[in-house]
Amino acid sequence: MTMTHSGQDPSGRKRVFSGIQPTGDGELHLGNLIGALENWVRMQDEYETYYCVVDLHAMTSPYDPKILDQARLTTAKTLLAIGVDPRRSLFYLQSQVPQHAELAWILGTITSIGQLERMTQFKEKADRSGQNLGLLAYPVLMAADIVLHRANAVPVGDDQTQHLELTRDLVQRFNGRFGDVFPLPDRISPPVGARVMSLQDPTAKMSKSDLDPDSRVNLLDSPDVVRKKLKSAVTDSDRTVRYDWSEKPGIANLLEIFSVCGGRPIPDLVAEFGEAGYGRFKEAVAESVVARLTPIRTRFKSLEDQEVGRIMLKGALDARSRAESTMVAVRRAVGLTGS
Ligand code: TYM
């Protein structure tokens, strides 16, 4: 398909890019699903979509090379199981498309180190796992991911806001200095669930790196594990179910999870469970999560590793040739025409 300069395909559809890290063993959690992946799947109907397992990003935190390969496969398989459709989306592994790294280098030459050092995620991760150049340059590679296919919109959770702002800064700086090559991308986050909180500490975001496995629901958790984790979710000493983030963050978090998994507006849930007691409320939340995750687990189990490998390779070949058309324009703009 031919691309226009503005980041739209000839039918006028806007272009979407997003990525996810195959961190640890590659399992994804409910925060990923609610904050980003539900939108990934939905946007396939309306937009031209590009989705990527960002394995180069996952190497910026300590990891085991023997596990990374399997983790990439698990993440890719989970995304297919959720409904990423390789017939409608360009779906691939970042490391199999070398233009991501090439463009990151070029964008790095217009990025200020001070701006990178001020990024919240860099400060948090550098404290935990030590500093390395990859961790500092992480947001530059993310910006390269987004602009490589000239995306207009990026479905992500709230925690990526600062990274998106940096991307927009870099687009403006690049276009100002070298000419109009990239569109300015917008962040797309869901109205409910853009920041799913830890089940054990509702003031911290649900995260793969949390040492407490009860803090998150993994998308492949069995129904019994899901029930146990939600039963042990931290709430408060009151017994009224109300949507109030400042007074009742644990309950507000569960209401958001329930609303998305059960497909019901929060006021309806409050009307039904307001005085039901926390025990009954948590059981109902758990059943909505189990119902949402069961088809994902079933589909995951039915996918063959080899078939997934083939899908990813085909996606990468396609992505390489599409990325090359942007890179030709980028190289020309920055003075690397090659003639
Ligand atoms: P990652 O792999 O940490 O998370 C993937 C997506 O899940 C969202 N998310 C959450 N949303 C709501 N509540 C939570 N508790 C929660 N935890 C995670 C994230 O916002 C994200 O959308 N830097 C990115 C990966 C990336 C990327 C990109 C994203 C690399 N290049 C280009 C978009 C475009 C990251 O670490 O996501």
Image (cartoon, rainbow, N blue to C red):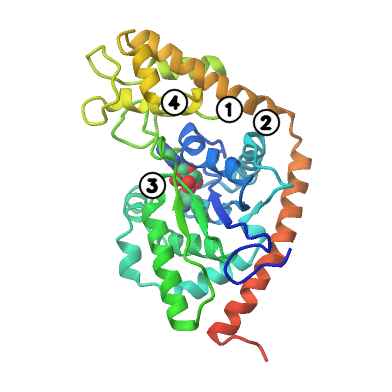
Vertical side of 19 occupied by 8: above or below: below
Q: CA distance from mark 4 to mark 1?
A: 20 Å
- Which residue is labeled 4 in the image? 259
Specify the label residue 126 is tagged with.
none
Name which residue type carries label 4.
Answer: Ser
Name which residue type carries label 3.
Answer: Asp
Q: Quadrant of residue 148?
A: bottom right
Vertical side of 89 occupied by 321: above or below: below
Residue occupying image coordinates x 51% and y 72%: 105
- Which residue is labeled 3 in the image? 159
**x then y, percent, for residue 11:** 68, 59
Q: Which comes before the other along the chain, label 1 or label 2?
A: 1
Marks 3,4: beta carbons within 8 A: no
- Which residue is labeled 1 in the image? 220
Q: CA distance from mark 1 to mark 2?
A: 8 Å
Q: CA distance from mark 3 to mark 4?
A: 20 Å
Vertical side of 315 occupied by 271: above or below: above
